[in-house]
Image (cartoon, rainbow, N blue to C red):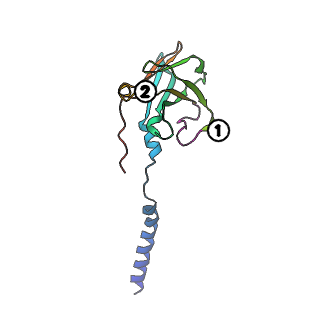
Amino acid sequence: MRSVAFFISIFVLFFSGCDSFFNRGYSVDIVSEKKIQASRKDAILKDNKVVMTVIATYLNNVSALAYYNREYFFIEIYNENQIDYSNVIDYTLNGRKPLWIREIKNDEFDEILRPNNKWSHCYLVAFNDISELESREMILKMNVGKVGAMSFDFSLKIVPLQM
């Protein structure tokens, strides 16, 4: 009888430890997944060295409720030398100039507007709303003075997550 009680207590102890793991389960972070799908990355190289890396995120695909009536992009710029190129960067979306550009400071970061790299400079860029037809070939271009140019193709549509 003692051996059966011992076996049952070991069995219960083993599965009670697993119970807490399975109760927590795996949950998908929807905002992070959408942000990854809505992001594009490019870099400028000089003499086989990376001068600047940029991640552009199309915020309308991340949160359509928060970002509407305009086309919004979260731009994360990183360069190893921490040079501020913001004064020489020209943005265009399908050939159109932005309405405004605003730097996002550390104290303004939230669930969506958060950089991947803590040394990055982050900007919110807004353009006039474009038509559904024009969005099929949506290209954001960045011309960084004499440093170089980058192009981010947002033509690929994101398939909504199925839960």
Q: Secondary structure at mark 1?
A: helix
Q: Disc 2 and disc 1: Cα gap in Å?
A: 31 Å
Query: Front-most of 13 and 41?
Result: 41
**Is residue 114 inside the magenta stretch?**
yes
Residue 130 — which label? 2
Q: Secondary structure at mark 2?
A: loop
Q: Residue at x 54, y 43 (%)?
A: 111
- Judge depth for marks 2 and 1 and give the one in front: 2
Query: Front-most of 152 and 97?
Result: 97
The residue carrying pointer 1 sits among few (fewer than 14), some (14 to 19) or many (20 or more) residues within 10 Å by Cα, namely few
Counting from the top left corner in percent of width and height, residue 100 is at 56, 24
**Is residue 28 inside the magenta stretch?**
no
Q: Is residue 43 visible?
A: yes
Residue at the farthest bottom position: 1
Residue stretch in magenta:
109-120
Q: Are marks 2 and 1 in contact (CB under 8 Å)?
A: no
Residue 88 — which label? none
Q: Name the residue carrying label 1.
A: 107
Residue at the farthest right position: 107
Counting from the top left corner in percent of width and height, residue 117 is at 55, 34
45 relative to 154, above or below: above
Q: Residue at x 44, y 77 (%)?
A: 9
